[in-house]
Amino acid sequence: MNTNMRQEILADTVDRLLNRISVSTCSFTTAAEAMRTLKEKDFEELSLKESKWEIKPNGRYVLNVNDSTVYAFTIGEDFDPERATEPEQMLRLAAAHTDHPCLYVKSKPEMQSQGYGKLNVEVYGGAILNTWLDRPLSVAGKVVIKSDHPFEPEIRIIDMKRPLFTIPNLAIHLNREVNKGVELNRQTDMAPLASVSEEELDEQFFMNMLARKCNVSTSEILDYELYLYNCDAGDLLGIREDMISAPRLDNITSVEACLQGICEAMRDGGINGILLFDNEEIGSRTKQGADSVLVSMVLEKIYASLGVAEDVAEMAIVNGFALSLDVAHGYHPNKSEKSDPTNLNPLGKGVVIKRSSAQNYVTDSSAIGSVMMIMENADIPYQKFASRSDVSQGGTLGSIASKYLPMKIVDMGVPMLAMHSSRELMAAVDQVALEQVVKEFFEA
């Protein structure tokens, strides 16, 4: 591939990723935009309420799970129910998560102090709190509205799409020790400012804004799940324009790679699928999270709908293979002591395969071997990650989902800096590599 073609691919990848980030502002909008993309690529929507699905070889299908999780799968044209356990008919999955650390709007959120309007919020996930100060913040999520049936309320997915709030820092003159590090109180220090108007605010100023957005009265709004997000635009930066700085790189990088892979990859036999889970940042222990039996139920339903015997379907799932995609810690040039001495993982050197003897990452050596061969055959750069032995490790949805999916799984993702900041940093070329991995994995 010549240099011009590489540059065109890189530019297209960066544009797509930044656009995906701009519209994926919480788990609900991320799922909604993923559904839109998949339907544009002729994926047929199925319902979990149907007893049996009318699916067939050469078909493309998608499921909306509780508005914040998406499952999508394709069936090869030569899929054979009687040969479902054979390598050519292998089940291949790629998983990512739709949520990110942010601020969650509480019930009755309006607070007022000396004419200032503020919001009462709580922290969602492991956010680096001080990076949320002095940022333009907007709000997105799910709103539940009265309907004619108590068990079927109306659901609206909304995004205000403009700066509405900010959390102002305290001036250094009033906090001389600020550059020595200051602990922020999650209740008192993280309340976003909404208004400084001379006019007296209504006691329900937030609910009134929400009602206007939904074109209903406040009395019609039953409840909501709303999140504040950093509405900064993402940027391509660096003297060589080789870095991406943006909110929500964790984990929209992986969501975009999953979507590109399932939409573009072609395979004659077998089943390819993507699983975009919510609630990874808070442990995945929800009906729409990875720590749920739902994904195994869906896979069993797929095989049953295709006429695969139950015992054969069980073996096909065991013989399957999955990629658990999430960002990895890259080498920090100002904090080199935080990296393992022999596994540095600098930005721009390719996809990171994550390993842990404690199985925080569910990767094992035989699964790694398969992924390495796929990447080497396609000339895709990769690295292997290990954390320092004296540093605690995070976990991924891969180790959680493996309880319900007893198949080979590899944890991997792009290396990045400032993970869980309101604005994160990665190398642009690593996104190209990640998307290539998923496509090659689905087609190999």
Image (cartoon, rainbow, N blue to C red):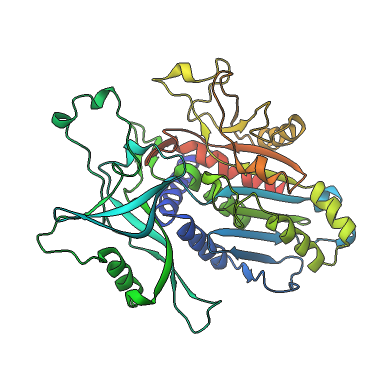
Q: Residue at x 25, y 24 (%)?
A: 179
**Can you see residue 285?**
yes
Near-viewer residue (413 or 310): 310
Q: Residue 102: x, y in percent?
A: 40, 47
* Number of marks drawn: 0
Asked whether, in this view, residue 398 is left or right of residue 15, the answer is right
Q: Residue 108: x, y in percent?
A: 34, 61
Q: Residue 185: x, y in percent?
A: 33, 38
Near-viewer residue (88 or 314): 314
In this view, the residue farthest toward the left is 198
Near-viewer residue (10 or 255): 255
Q: Quadrant of residue 45?
A: bottom right
Quadrant into which the N terminus falls: top right
Near-viewer residue (128 or 414): 128
**Can you see residue 265?**
no
Q: Residue at x 42, y 51 (%)?
A: 21
Compared with residue 405, is residue 213 higher up or lower down, i.e. above or below?
Answer: below
In this view, the residue farthest toward the bottom is 148
Compared with residue 272, is residue 205 higher up or lower down, i.e. above or below?
Answer: below
Compared with residue 180, is residue 109 higher up or lower down, i.e. above or below?
Answer: below
Compared with residue 146, is residue 129 higher up or lower down, i.e. above or below?
Answer: above
Quadrant into which the C terminus falls: top right
Q: Residue at x 48, y 20 (%)?
A: 338
